[in-house]
Amino acid sequence: MHYSILFLVCAFCRSDNVGDLTKRVDVHETEMTRLKSENEMLKDIIKNIMTKITYLEDKINEIIHNKRVSTTNPVYVAFHANVAGKVSVHDNEDLHFQTVNANLGSAYNGSTGVFKSPSRGYYVFFVHFLTYAPKTIEAVIVKNGASIQNVYAGTREWAGYGTGSNLAIVELMQGDRVWVKVHNKYHDMFDVLDGLLGTFAGFLLYPTS
């Protein structure tokens, strides 16, 4: 009698444990199903985000490329010119480097000696002089009439030549003008420059928008 009751109790306990375990398994399976579903949703969200990031990167690269094209491919500018023959100079005289050897962009006028900026950017200008002995000259690179750099050349020896050069880097707006003029007092006057080696040159270093 006692063995029968004990058997029934044990059987009941086992049955109850199995049922409880079954319920727990069902709960875990439901949770796993939910997590798998959420995982798939997250994958879709991440994929969508990556697609948008790729799209934005393409747009940014396109904008950067277009900006580079617009700023690094303006009108190309470079010129090189010499004065002609023996040159006598006077106070504040604008020097005309008439012999134009190169004029990419057609921004330099050999008749007036004036460079006119076709686009905004940083430009380099170079001036070189060769004077007959014993002559000297001081000249000025000017921007719209304002001095940006002095240039001196010459010798007080009674034989040979005197040389001198200088350069300037300056930002110009479109339409700004640059030329070389004689200093208002520091120079000799008659047959000062050997034109073949008197040079004015310039080029666009870096465009700005």
Image (spheres, rainbow, N blue to C red):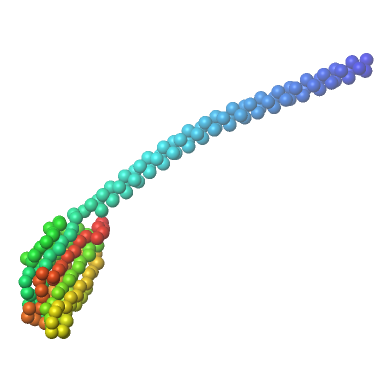
State whether residue 6 is above or below residue 47.
above
Q: In this view, does 143 lie to the left or right of 26?
A: left
Residue drawn at x 70%, y 23% as measured from the top left: 22
Residue drawn at x 35%, y 46% as measured from the top left: 60
Position of residue 119 measured from the top left corner of the image (x, y, whole percent): 19, 58
Q: In this view, does 103 lie to the left or right of 122?
A: left
Q: Which residue lies furthest to the right in this view?
A: 1
In this view of the protein, which residue sits in the foreground, 83 or 208?
A: 83
Picture quadrant where residue 198 is located: bottom left
Residue drawn at x 24%, y 67% as measured from the top left: 169
Position of residue 81 measured from the top left corner of the image (x, y, whole percent): 12, 65
Can you say which quadrant of the picture contains the C terminus? bottom left
Picture quadrant where residue 52 is located: top left
State whether residue 120 is above or below residue 58.
below
State whether residue 142 is above or below residue 20.
below
Task: Report how many numbered discs are placed on residues in the image.
Answer: 0
Q: Can residue 181 be seen in this view?
A: yes
Can you say which quadrant of the picture contains the N terminus? top right
In this view of the protein, which residue sits in the foreground, 189 or 107?
A: 189
Q: Residue furthest front?
A: 159
Q: In this view, does 148 lie to the left or right of 192?
A: right
